[in-house]
Amino acid sequence: STIMTLSLYANPLSQPSRAVHTLLEIAGVTHTYNTIDLVKGEQKGEAYRKINTNGTIPTIIDGDFILYESAAILVYIATKYMDGDVRAQWYAAADDYAKMAKINQYLHWHHTHLRSGWMAFKLLPKLFGREVDQMAVDACEARVNNAVNILNANLESAGTKYFCGDAPCIVDVQFACELLQNTDTAVNFDITQRWKALAAWLERMRNHPAMQKSHAFFYKFHKPKQDSFTLTYFNTSGR
């Protein structure tokens, strides 16, 4: 019988794509990585929309099952491909309803708080010779500032190294992949002065081997403190 390999449709410059890729690496799931070219608009093309009618990334195909929305995919990977202590850490033990609920709380919260188009609004117009919408940039910055205030306070009050305890879980992966888009790029969002608990957490996540693997391509092009970058930034054909 043929062993079905999970297929991931993603782009390494996309935060949710990196989150899913990171967890697949942690879970040791054999998978194929299909790079969707965002500059060419491949995610909006007819072929891809047959897989995901939203025209968004990431999407996975596992056998004949198609799933999109990164938070849903993270839970699916953790519950299908992890068990025992590994599942208990990255998601929750089968009877740990409080931790499951906490994880779901944070994954839902993520969409309207930490998730923003800050980099897209601030940097991409420059890249394509368009005018920067400063109101949109300011709104994104305000949203992210509010979100990191909340996250830093939560870490401080819990007194834990990660958001659901002293070991990372899927929430930490989702948050870290998002935040790095603002801290480790030309957005130059510095969290080290005002939000020390969050900065220490992010450094721990940044150094996780699976995070380093899923961010290898990201760091080829993102150079903090540099405002200029070129279209080669988007050339993902070399993966």
Image (cartoon, rainbow, N blue to C red):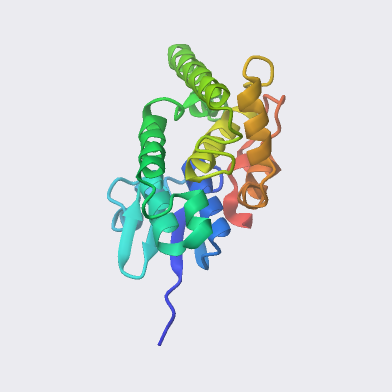
Residue 180, position as x, y percentages in the image: 60, 34
Identify which residue, 60 or 54, lies in the foreground.
Answer: 60
Note whether residue 14 is visible: no
Q: Is residue 23 left or right of residue 73?
A: right
Residue 109, position as x, y percentages in the image: 38, 30
Residue 25, position as x, y percentages in the image: 57, 58
Residue situated furthest front in the rendering: 95
Identify which residue, 195 or 17, lies in the foreground.
Answer: 195
In the rendered view, would you say 177 is above or below 183?
below
Q: Residue at x 56, y 64 (%)?
A: 28
Residue 172, position as x, y percentages in the image: 53, 39
Residue 239 sits in quarter? bottom right
In the rendered view, would you say 75 is above or below 226?
below
Q: Residue at x 35, y 35 (%)?
A: 108
Q: Is residue 66 left or right of residue 230?
A: left
Note whether residue 165 is visible: yes
Q: How many marks?
A: 0
Q: Residue at x 68, y 21 (%)?
A: 192
Quadrant of the image containing the N terminus: bottom left
Residue 231 sits in quarter? top right
Identify which residue, 35 or 183, lies in the foreground.
Answer: 183
In the rendered view, would you say 28 is above or below 53?
below
Residue situated furthest bottom in the rendering: 1
